[in-house]
Image (spheres, helix red, strand yellow):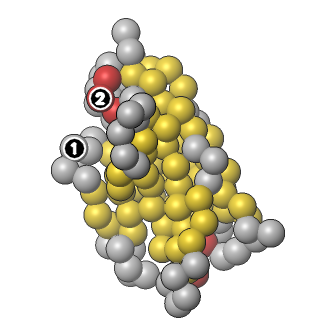
Amino acid sequence: QVQLVESGGGLVQPGGSLRLSCKASGFILSDYAMSWYRQAPGKKRELVAAFRNRGGDTNYADSVKGRFTISKDNTKNTMYLQMGSLKPEDTAVYFCKAVRWTTGNGYWGQGTQVTVSS
């Protein structure tokens, strides 16, 4: 059974840091294009960061460039999002997504809430 479970969200002050994790089970991480999305209240879900190819090249939304870093550990079947210099506008539910490179079949995690507030 394919499953993605996010963790690491929480309440953090502006300027703080958090690391989100996305643990995959039921499939091999390297067979999938992995990415992070977020959705703030009343807004559309948006791409935050992604691995755009199997070589590990990455894409970031302009709003998070230089502050967020996507990474993964294939041995742990886990993807990460290191978030720094957090701003109130980063407040959202963060989701991980996996899309199989060969078929396009995709899966979403349940999301983890990140709240940036003083």
User: Can you give x and y, in whole percent of width and height, for residue 105 in the image?
Assistant: 58, 78
Give the camera-side residue of 115 and 78: 115
Q: Is residue 39 left or right of residue 2?
A: left
- In space, the residues marked 1 and 2 are separated at their CA atoms by 10 Å
At label 1, counting other C-alpha atoms closer than 10 Å, the crowd grade (few under 14, some 14-19, many 20 or more) is few
- At which x and y percent is residue 2? 73, 68
The quarter of the rendered structure image containing the C terminus is: top left
Residue at 45 percent of width and 24 percent of height: 115
Q: Residue 86, image x and y in percent?
A: 32, 29
7 over 74 or under it: above or below: above
Identify the residue at image location x=57%, y=38%: 112
Question: Is residue 18 visible in this depiction of the protein?
Answer: no
* Circle on res. 89: 2
Q: Which residue is mark 1?
A: 63
Left or right placement of residue 101 versus residue 90 in this view: right
Asked if residue 61 is positioned above or below residue 83 in the image, the reply reads below
Residue type highlighted by circle 1: Ser
Percent position of residue 103, x then y? 55, 88
Foreground pick, 54 / 97? 97
Answer yes or no: do the residues labelled 1 and 2 have beta carbons within 8 Å?
Answer: yes
Considering every residue shown, the one lying at the far top of the view is: 118
